[in-house]
Every structure is written in C-alpha cells, then in structure tokens.
Amino acid sequence: MGEIAKNLTEIKSGIPENVTLVAVSKTKPNEVLMEAYEAGQRIFGENRVQELIPKSETLPKDIEWHMIGHLQSNKIRHIAPFVSCIHSVDKVKLLREINKQAAKNNRVIRVLLQFHVAQEETKFGLSLEEAETYLKLSEFADLNNIEIAGVMGMATFTNDEAQVRNEFKVLKSIFDKLKTSFFSDQSSFKEISMGMSGDYKIAMEEGSTMVRVGSSIFGTRHVVG
C-alpha cells in the first residue's frame, strides 16, 4: 500500500460515517490524485479554477469536484457544467451568477455560504447579518438553480486550540440559526464544512459534517508550473 493510500485509510478510520472527507488536491499533479482515487477517494477539492478545469477533463468522470477557494464571478461559467459543490460563496452576487450559469447548464449546483469566523483579516466570508438580510429578500426565493446546502468557515491559523474550538462553535451556531430561521423544512441544508489537516479533529467534535484535508493525505505541496 502506498503512502497516500495509507494516509487515507488512517484518516477515514477516525472519521464517522456522517462526515464527508474532501481531499484537498490543489497543486497536486494528476498521478497523485489517481493514487488517492485508486485508494477509494472520490471527492476532491480545488481552490483555483484554472487548475480545476484540466483535472476535471482528464481524470475519471465519477469524481465529485468541490470548489473550495475564493471564487470570482467571471470564473463561474467555466466550472458550472460539472462542479458538484461550491464551498466559498462569500458574496450575494456570486449566488446570482452561480444560479445563472447553473440554469444555462440545466443543473442545480450545491453551494455553501462562507462565513468569516477567524481573527485574520485576510480570510473571506459573510457576516451572519449579511446572510440573514439577503435570505429574507424575495429575490432569493427565485434562485431555482442553486441549493444552499450549509455553511463553510476557516479557523484562525494558530496553535491556540481554545481559540480554534471557539471559532468552530461560532460557525456551528450560525448554521443552527440559519437552519431554524430559513431552512427548517429543507433536509438538504445540513453541511458544516469546517476543519482542515491541522484542526479537523477539533472541528468534528464541534459538529463538522465535511472536512477539507490536504497535507495529511498528500504530504507537502507539489507546485504546478
């Protein structure tokens, strides 16, 4: 068994059935993804559209591609034909554009609303107030080609476990508020995407249903030229 297969087996053994493992494959070449694929992994996350497109064209068609990086509106049309889930919706205009491009492709695209719960200013994300304001608008009800499946967030990059845990608690509370106020009758609103290689175990303890793990599976980065 290769190193990647071993890592996947070990990680999956510690993840309960209700938690989805997204293998973060950014900067990794196709042969590395294929090692994970052959070990049974089918859900991969990329953070750049220009990397995601060639991978989707050349790798097996039963892979479920998740866009996890910051996304610009003008790039959505390139991934709308095939992307399974977009984690990084941090602006209302992105929702409109994803809906528009999904409609052109006769698809419904799952999206996660990204919230800013970390202390770092560099992190992207909505505030709870922004999300609530938009979800109350009649315009939102007309977006028939997106499915808001839950929330996503990133904790501060720190060794302070208490701080990380607290930020995950904040995201869980945002999910609970939105579920109660706007999605109580929608079983599809169920995902809390939080936790990466360094903190996914804490995230699962705090209610994560989807973890985004890269270096713990693939090791250090391969840089694509």
Image: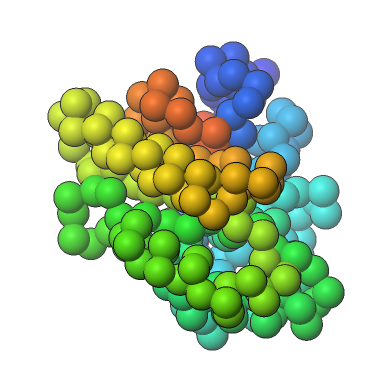
Q: Where is residue 179 in the image (x, y as percent from the top left)?
A: 52, 45
Of 65 and 150, the residue lying toward us = 150
Is residue 66 visible in the rendered image? The answer is no
Of 188 and 34, the residue lying toward us = 188
Is residue 165 visible in the rendered image? The answer is yes
Q: Which residue is drawn at 30% across and 55% down?
A: 116
Q: Position of residue 213 (x, y in %)?
A: 48, 37
Of 104 and 222, the residue lying toward us = 104
Q: Which residue is drawn at 58% across and 79% down?
A: 139
- The vertical placement of 144 against 169, above or below, is below
Q: Position of residue 74 (x, y in %)?
A: 54, 85
- The quadrant the N terminus occupies is top right
Q: In which quarter of the image is residue 40?
A: top right
- The vertical placement of 59 against 71, above or below, is above
- Direction from residue 49 to residue 196 in the image, left or right: left
Of 85 and 29, the residue lying toward us = 85
Q: Where is residue 219 in the image (x, y as percent from the top left)?
A: 45, 35
Q: Residue at x 67, y 60 (%)?
A: 147
The tally of labels here is 0
Q: Which residue is drawn at 76% across and 61% down?
A: 58
Query: In the rendered view, how is the structure colored?
Result: rainbow
